Amino acid sequence: MTNNEQMRQRRRSGEPVRHGRQKRHHPFATIVKIATAALGVVVVSSTSVAAIAAWDVASSVKPGIHLSHVQSQTPGPIPNVGAISGGVNLLLTGTDTRTGQGGVYSSSAELAGSSGVGSNDVTILLHIAQDHKSATIVSFPRDMIIPIPACQKTTGGTYPASSAAMLNTALYRGGLSCAVTTIESLTGLQIPFAAGISFDGVTAMSDAIGGVTVCLATPVNDNYTNPPLHLAAGQQTIVGPMALSFLRSRHGVGDGSDLGRISNQQVFMSALMRKIVTGGVLSNPFQLYPLAKAATSSMVLSDTLTSPTTMVQIALALKDTGLSNMVFLQYPTVADPSNPNRVIPQTSAASVLNAALVADQPVQLSGAPGRAAVVAPAAPAAPAPAPTTTPGKASTAVPTPVPTATAPSNSVVLPQSVTGQTAAQQTCTKGN
């Protein structure tokens, strides 16, 4: 039973409601007093709503994972909620573990495939510029062969460094901290924030946002996902377990590779950002905090993220970025000459990208979307406005201005080999 439910039960029974610390009149305590006096009928300011919601989110936060190279932070009192100060580097990993997922993932065959910490099948870096005017979201292929530094095992001891190993081995070698230090070594960035999400976490986040509408250029069918995917071409709103299957699908999209899966995920993520930004989620605490609560209750977070408002503050840093300045891209790779089923970094393009990230410069794509994405057909042009006429004068028509997206003047143009899209760009998934 939650605290709010307990208070309501005590009101009905006539039992006095007992509050915790009330010597300090912080926003939440003040609102509780008003709610009690008004029998739950309250009109509150957005700041008060944010304080209540932040307290509610805090109750669902799990103990944080300490990143070995980052100084721990002690959460302070609930502040007024605003965008985080300065830039952000946050690493998100998606584990393929079946442990604790239940349902179809509880069979012995599924658990034999991956259990425990699992592998980081999804590794995504979010880089928000210091001025919050641009954001770069980089997806790293799970099958990329790169050096992995020595990492402290989650069970004790040290996992030795490897000069060449698959990226998705970093998580089981040393947990979230190892995944972070691996991407730091690859890019040259310092990454103070990290989060890990499992299958049920993806489902919870999808439910919290109310589903995402994506465009499918062709039908998508994949019998290897749970549940299987059978989606018709056109606009499809996917939510819950179906969203998980869509994001995990490899056989059903593009060329059936992990690189195709990355570009399919970018179709989903760009559509998600359009919904969050144009739908006003970032300016509405009633919508923003359910997302934060879904995240904190279903994700493993670095201890730098366990403050109840930090995730919201990071989200608010994107409020005025603009969809055209949010760039989703795949870390540039080429086929591994020693193994056709693996990839290695494309050195020249990766160097350009890494330098831009370290210098906090926005990036601009010059290449096409990825293997499983195509640019959506242009919408039919709106009819021209009727000309205005005045007796004795020539007919005049007032043209409708067409908005254009302008890249920041200091943008780094990436080589054509770097694939991706902006959040403003309408793309469709191409089935396999």
Image (spheres, grey):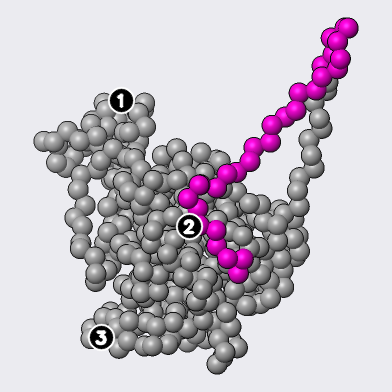
Q: Position of residue 45 (x, y in %)?
A: 35, 28
SS at mark 1? Answer: loop
Q: Is residue 158 found left or right of 271 in the rendered image?
A: left
Write down the region rendered in magenta. 388-417
Is disc 2 surrounded by few (<14), some (14 to 19) or many (20+) residues within 10 Å? many
Q: Which residue carries the number 3 mark?
A: 158
Q: Amino acid at mark 2?
A: Thr
| Whether label 2 touches label 1, CB < 8 Å | no
Which mark's residue is nearer the viewer, 3 or 2? 2
Q: Amino acid at mark 1?
A: Ala
Q: Is residue 122 found left or right of 82 in the rendered image?
A: right
Q: Is residue 376 found left or right of 269 in the rendered image?
A: right
Q: Residue at x 38, y 88 (%)?
A: 163
Q: Which residue carries the number 1 mark?
A: 38
Is disc 1 surrounded by few (<14), some (14 to 19) or many (20+) residues within 10 Å? few
Q: Position of residue 371 (x, y in %)?
A: 66, 70
Which quadrant of the structure image shows residue 63?
Answer: bottom left
Q: Position of residue 17 (x, y in %)?
A: 21, 37
Q: Is residue 51 above or below residue 135?
A: above
Q: Residue at x 26, y 81 (%)?
A: 152
SS at mark 2? Answer: strand
Residue closer to the observer: 316 or 27:
316
Residue closer to the observer: 24 or 248:
248
Q: Which residue carries the number 2 mark?
A: 136
In terms of sequence position, does the residue under pointer 3 or pointer 2 come before the other?
2
Q: Amino acid at mark 3?
A: Thr
Answer yes or no: is residue 241 visible. Answer: no
| Most common SS among magenta residues | loop
| 172 in magenta | no
